[in-house]
Amino acid sequence: MDDLKFGVRNKRGDWTPNKPVEYAPLFQFPTRFMAILKWLPHYFLPWNVIFAISAVAYWAWVIPSVETMQTISVGWVAWLYGVNAVCVFLFYGAFELHLYVLKRQENRFKYNGKFPADQKSKAFWFESQNLDNILRTFLSGVTIWTALEVGMLWAYANGYAPWLSFAENPWTLALVALVVPVIHEFHFFCVHRLIHTPFLYKWVHSVHHNSVNPSPWSSLSMHPVEHLLYFGTVFYHLVLPSNPIIMLYQLHYAGFGAIPGHVGFDKVEVGDDKLVDSHAYAHYLHHKYFEVNYGDALIPLDRWFGTWHDGSPEGDARMQERYKRRKEKLAAKKASSETQEAAR
Ligand SMILES: [Zn+2]
Ligand SMILES: [Zn+2]
């Protein structure tokens, strides 16, 4: 597949898409019905359908009986950790194997021309991005994911969370399932913006940002506090009229859904002529420039807050202008405090 039909490659080997990233046509006024209709299949396919099916499969084959879940015990908690770990290993590992180990599409559609394995960095445990990212994923990522899952299932089993049945409330539950990605986007934007405040950035979020050139295992490479905030998206189901399967979908949307944004490739080649969009560019730009794109372009939150970068030269100019203004503001503040100091 010729990736230069879709973008350009610079001297360093970094590939950039020709088309700027677009916001989902939701929450745009006036409403563009045709645009929404055209966009709608992308809302479901392929990623959201995969995460929703995985939640149903968990409910059918993995989650223990309600009686078992009324009391927390090592047996079923360890079982859930095991299944989550195996699923993460297989799902993340499939991308890693296909794109980074076997390099089946070499650097076609790859934003950063370099592969993390070729660059050692002291920022990582054992100076290896992959080893560091994998350890953080399984040590705290899957552990905190499982802990919140266990807590929510225990709450459902004991009647502490609103549990509607699909037979009696199909429309309410369909609506809640439909807004799962919207809840995720809103929650992710808020916690992500929060951990970009100077103190929390240094203490917590810088761990995730060590991966300037993200690869599949970077997805859940976070500080435990960030894992807790990130997977905290399930707590909305303590107050929403919901169902454990939708709660699992919310959790899988966060856990497995982190992958497409960190895959490092704009499109994944499937077979000889099929391409699957990763929708990773907005978040890739976040890893590259740090202070843009706190969200993933489902709700135009970054545009409303002035932090949107769509990858175009105009987007770049807007970012530079914002950085310049902030620098000027800081310099003015410093100058005024120095004048005050001198006047004393
Ligand atoms: Zn990231
Ligand atoms: Zn960030």
Image (cartoon, rainbow, N blue to C red):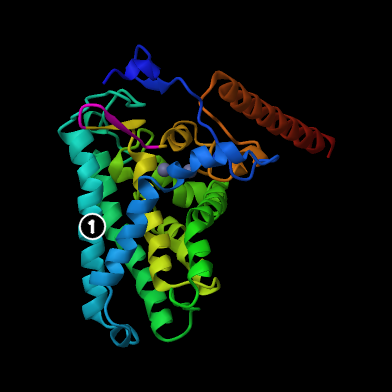
Q: Position of residue 313 (x, y in %)?
A: 55, 19
Q: Is residue 18 left or right of residue 277?
A: right
Q: Going 33% across and 44% down the picture, which residue do you hit?
A: 218
Query: Above or below — where is 335 with respect to 147?
Result: above
Magenta range: 271-278
User: Looking at this view, is 36 or 60 the one in front?
Assistant: 36
> Dot 1: few (<14), some (14–19), or many (≥20) neighbours within 10 Å?
some
Judging from the image, what secondary structure is the residue with disc 1 in? helix
Q: In which quarter of the image is ligand 1?
A: top left
**Given the image, on which type of amino acid does mark 1 rest?**
Cys
Q: Is residue 308 magenta?
A: no
Q: Mark 1 points at which residue?
A: 87
Q: Going 17% across and 35% down the picture, which residue do you hit?
A: 101
Q: Where is residue 79 in the image (x, y as percent from the top left)?
A: 21, 72
User: Looking at this view, is 321 or 108 the one in front?
Assistant: 108
Q: In which quarter of the image is the N terminus?
A: top left
Q: Is residue 272 magenta?
A: yes
Q: Is residue 65 visible?
A: yes
Q: Going 78% across and 38% down the picture, which residue do you hit?
A: 341
Q: In this view, does 42 lie to the left or right of 302?
A: left
Query: Above or below — where is 266 with respect to 196?
Result: above
Q: In which quarter of the image is the C terminus?
A: top right
Q: Is residue 265 visible?
A: no
